[in-house]
Amino acid sequence: MHTFEGTFLGDTSKLKDDDCLECKVCHYVYDPKKGDIDQNIEPNTPFSKLPPYWICPICGCEKELFLVVRHDES
């Protein structure tokens, strides 16, 4: 189960390397373990290390509008 922590508003210092982030427009989830093969992003690339040109591969939403998804520890 997961909860949304909200948008990080472009402040990558708030992100952990293993954080998954969800597009608030189309709900695509960027998983750093998988990367984004379509945009040549290698697996194990944290969201904070994505290049400036990276956009949602589904709808084109900008990175700053993604929401942090936290996994519950329970």
Image (tube, grey):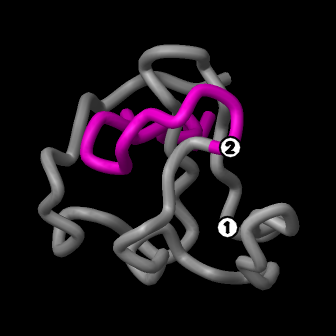
Examine the rendered structure and indicate whether residue 32 appears above or below residue 9.
below
Residue at 77%, 78% in the rendered image: 40
Q: Secondary structure at mark 1?
A: loop
- The alpha-carbon separation of the residues under discs 1 and 2 comes to 14 Å
> Which quadrant is the N terminus positioned in?
top right
What's the amino acid at mark 2? Pro
Q: Where is residue 22 shown, x and y percent of the image?
A: 53, 33
Examine the rendered structure and indicate whether residue 36 appears above or below residue 71.
below
What's the amino acid at mark 1? Pro
Q: Which mark is residue 32?
A: 1
Examine the rendered structure and indicate whether residue 6 appears above or below residue 9.
above
Pointer 1 or 2: first along the chain:
1
Please identify the quarter of the rendering in which residue 27 is found: top right
Instruction: Please provide the residue range marked out in magenta.
Output: 57-74
Residue at 30%, 31% in the rendered image: 5
Q: Where is residue 61 shown, x and y percent of the image?
A: 43, 34
Residue in front for this viewpoint, 55 or 64: 55
Q: Where is residue 44 shown, x and y percent of the image?
A: 72, 82
Please identify the quarter of the rendering in which residue 18 is found: bottom right
Please identify the quarter of the rendering in which residue 11 is found: bottom left
Is residue 71 covered in magenta? yes
| Nearer to us: label 1 or label 2 | 2
> Which quadrant is the C terminus positioned in?
top right
Residue in front for this viewpoint, 12 or 19: 12
State how many labels appear.
Answer: 2
Q: Secondary structure at mark 2?
A: loop
Q: Which mark is residue 57?
A: 2
Residue at 44%, 83% in the rendered image: 49
